[in-house]
Image (cartoon, rainbow, N blue to C red):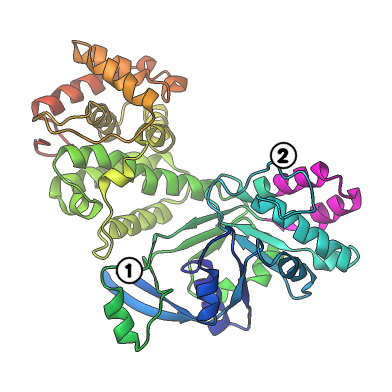
Amino acid sequence: MRAFVDWMIDILNEKTDFDGDVRIVQPIRHGTGELVNSQDGLYHVLLQGISQGREVNDTRLISCVAGVLNPFTQWEQYLKEGENAELQFIISNTTEAGIAFSAADDTTDRVPETFPGKLTLLLYRRYNHFQGAGDKGVVFLPCELIEKNGETLKDCIERYIAHWNLPAQFKSWVSDHCLFCNTLVDRIVTGFPKEHGPNIQQSLGYEDQLLVQAEPFHLWVIEGNERVRALLPFAQTDLNVKFAPDLTPYRSRKVRILNGTHTAMVPVAYLRGLRTVREAIEDPVVHKFVENLIFQEIIPTLDLPETELRQFANDVLERFRNPFIRHELLSIALNSVSKFRVRVLPSLLAYHERRGKLPENLTFSLAALIAFYRGALPAGEKIPLNDSAEIIRHFERSWDMISLEDITRSALENPEFREYRLADVPGLLAMAAEQLSLIQSGTEKLSSPKVTLT
């Protein structure tokens, strides 16, 4: 949040008449709130990476943070924020698990454990303090990486209202006068730059323990009406913020191009002996594979204008080449099978449906995934798999089979893929088995001259 939303608000304050303060609410009992307060809310954002072909290395002092509250130790002070007539937005990023309802929060007499529970009581204080005034509704902009995050947050609040038997008029006020926007956020934030942080602090002239590093690329898509657009004058800046009636196409673009390419590239690059995203994208064979994957097979399955898709794809390739971030392939490989189901298979199947043929690169990445989940390179080196025990056992049983066709069929029928009935997709089993054979023999083809992964 400090390197994304707060950074944007700081720019809004500079470039427009927005003039907004940020009050941070610590979502967990023990965090960095005291450190933020000890620095009077001041900290630097360090942007490092490649943007439009040039290297970026910029530092910005953020001055919009007015302090941090810890609701676990400052509960009444937290609730009084609901009485602030100037409060317009509540923005959150409590991780994917943060927007949740818990029946264990069975009373309003103690601090609720969940974020929506705490939020419900803040809104109830606000509703009572302003006697249900319609103009005191709040705009919610949750940034958690879950689908329909705004609608999910509203649902949790309504469940708490019912759970705690709060007045029906309060529920109507939340529904009629508070706006819950679905959003999509995209920026890699790596936190404090441990390796070169002291040198940066020295160049700044003082010790900033809250220095936070991020990539230059940023995107915030907001499903918001004209009221939200007017309240947030991003159009007067060059910030990459989009207001859309439906963010589904943008979500599909991100999941399939950015996340999908990450997931599809990992087994291919790892089997080739590469270990980081930057190494992979700078390898000429993997780079060509990735380009073909994105521009020839993924983009044709998406519904945004091609110019927008190609620009986003070029941004993704620049992000992969970021020299300031060491992104390990094995860290991306965590739970690769479920990621492949969500991020890659929709593109493969959509391409087959639209073009009437199988995409060679996406199918090759599927074969490479099967080879990766053997748990060892052809030369014998172990691959540290990090997935559920059920998935790993299934692939172990698959690789106990004799023929590559049987191995492939079994792999395609693993629990995560079962809903797609991949073995029944015309030609997929045969093509994946053939590509798996080439991978195992070290003579596979990546839509380019033959290369060796071992």
Residue 360: x and y, percent?
25, 31
Q: Which residue lies furthest to the bottom in this view?
A: 205
Q: In this view, does 395 lie above or below 268?
A: above
Q: Is residue 287 above or below residue 15?
A: above
The quarter holding residue 40 reads bottom right
Does label 2 or label 1 sit earlier along the sequence? Answer: 2
Specify the segment rendered in magenta: 154-180
Residue 239: x and y, percent?
49, 71
Residue 184 seen by the camera: yes
The residue labelled by disc 2 is 103
Q: How many labels does the image show?
A: 2
Asked whether 175 falls inside the magenta stretch, the response is yes
Q: Is residue 162 above or below residue 359?
A: below
Residue 211: x and y, percent?
40, 74
Q: 309 or 117, which lies in front?
A: 117
Mark seen at residue 193: 1
